[in-house]
Image (spheres, rainbow, N blue to C red):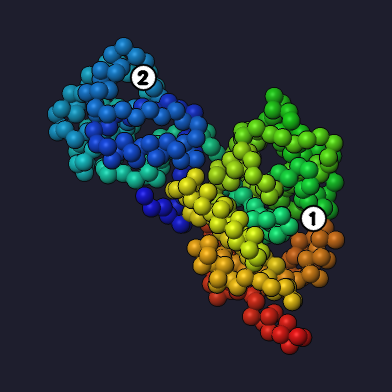
Amino acid sequence: MGHSDRPDELDRIIAIPRISLQAFCETPDLAHTINEAAADRRMDKAHVKVQMGGAPAAVEAYRSAPTPNLIVIETLSDRNDLVANLEALAEFCDSGTRVVVIGRVNDIILYRDLMGRGVSEYLVGPVSVIDFIRSIGHLYGHEGAEAIGRVIAFVGAKGGVGASTICHNVAWSIARNLDVETVIADLDLAFGTGGLDFNQDPPQGVAEAVFAPDRLDAGLVDRLLSRCADKLSLLAAPATLERSYDFNETAFDSLIDILRASTPYVALDVPHAWSAWTRRMLVGADEVVLVAQPDLANLRNVKSILDTLRVARPNDSRPKLVMNGIGVQKRPEIGIAEFSRAVELEPACVIPYDARLFGTAANNGQMIAEVEAANAIAATFSELGRAVTGRFEIKQAKKNLLGPILARLRKRA
């Protein structure tokens, strides 16, 4: 099963709410497709059961059992048999149950007839995993299912590669350039740098949201947010070691749901660690940005993360790889082309090493564009921000900023 690499296409697919879905298939192909869809992150909350037998099996199943929220029926029979089975099924359907029919005939008259009989949707097979999820999402899209926001997770392939700095600068550029509300959630509770990078010292933040699940609602989250710039807010990490931060897999789910429901763009600053909850943050994000530097440990870790996410997110675009801190004088580095071949992924952008620029920004609690608005690195953050929001892909011509910088380094040498 292939997948689209266009974030704008995947953006239109909402996550499915907590529904029960039972499918009655006539072909193994559709049964396999629905089982794959059930494993997709967008259907994480849905309870899905797949059976064979088509419409007749559905009629028999519900003679003595309550119907679920959604029944999916595959039919290879003619129109008369289908209508007869649907009429029989209607006798047992509970109020509120929806029915989706998947057939092989592209017939507008049949479609109108089925709609007139209360069928919620008619799909012409074969359908792909994404088409199936999109169609189910359309049925529940007006019922508050997984509201509007796009979640972008930033993570480093290794500690200290600058993933937090890139997360903060990209989120800042999204808020400024697109003029939309954006929230940074600093999930590195022990050592997060969000407060430092924005010169903020909020008394509360993400810890209060996670450690008080019974009180967690949109109002509490709004009170915990610290305003960093116009249209940009920070949910800061406590950055203290007064308690341990051991969380279960779903500890952040409610927080992410609230942020997604109220904010167009949510940037998750995910710590370099591997646990059930960090894996869940990466798998569940709409876009993943993987930051690395050009050495062997980074190469190994990038490949491991890409392989893991490829299996866990088969219907999503691949992570965007950012090569950061390139061109350190006298430091042996794996070449960008060689690194890309090894991990089988071209970098979305390459950011050169500039100790003065990044050091000044960090010490002043500023973003790169605030220190040097005309610097090419600021433009790279801006383009990366547009790319992860689906506004456009990064221009290849501007991808590599190393040519002139490496030339200067060779002259000094």
Q: Position of residue 308 (x, y in %)?
A: 53, 48
User: Quarter of the image containing the C terminus?
Assistant: bottom right
Q: Secondary structure at mark 2?
A: loop
Q: Kindly identify the residue that appears in the image at 85 percent across and 61 percent down.
A: 363
Q: Name the kind of residue labelled 2 in the image.
A: Thr
Disc 1 residue crowd, few under 14, some 14–19, many 20+, Cα 10 Å: many
Q: Quadrant of residue 405?
A: bottom right
Q: Name the kind of residue labelled 1 in the image.
A: Asp
Q: Kindly identify the residue that appears in the image at 46 percent across and 36 percent down.
A: 43
Looking at the image, residue 382 lies above or below residue 133: below
Q: Position of residue 403 (x, y in %)?
A: 64, 80
Near-viewer residue (380 or 309): 309
Disc 2 residue crowd, few under 14, some 14–19, many 20+, Cα 10 Å: many
Numbered label attached to residue 197: 1
Q: Secondary structure at mark 1?
A: helix
Going from the N terminus, do you reach mark 2 or mark 1 first? 2
Q: Is residue 116 left or right of residue 394?
A: left
Numbered label attached to residue 67: 2
Q: Is residue 112 visible?
A: no
Q: Which residue is the extreme one toward the bottom?
A: 411
Q: Is residue 375 left or right of residue 64?
A: right
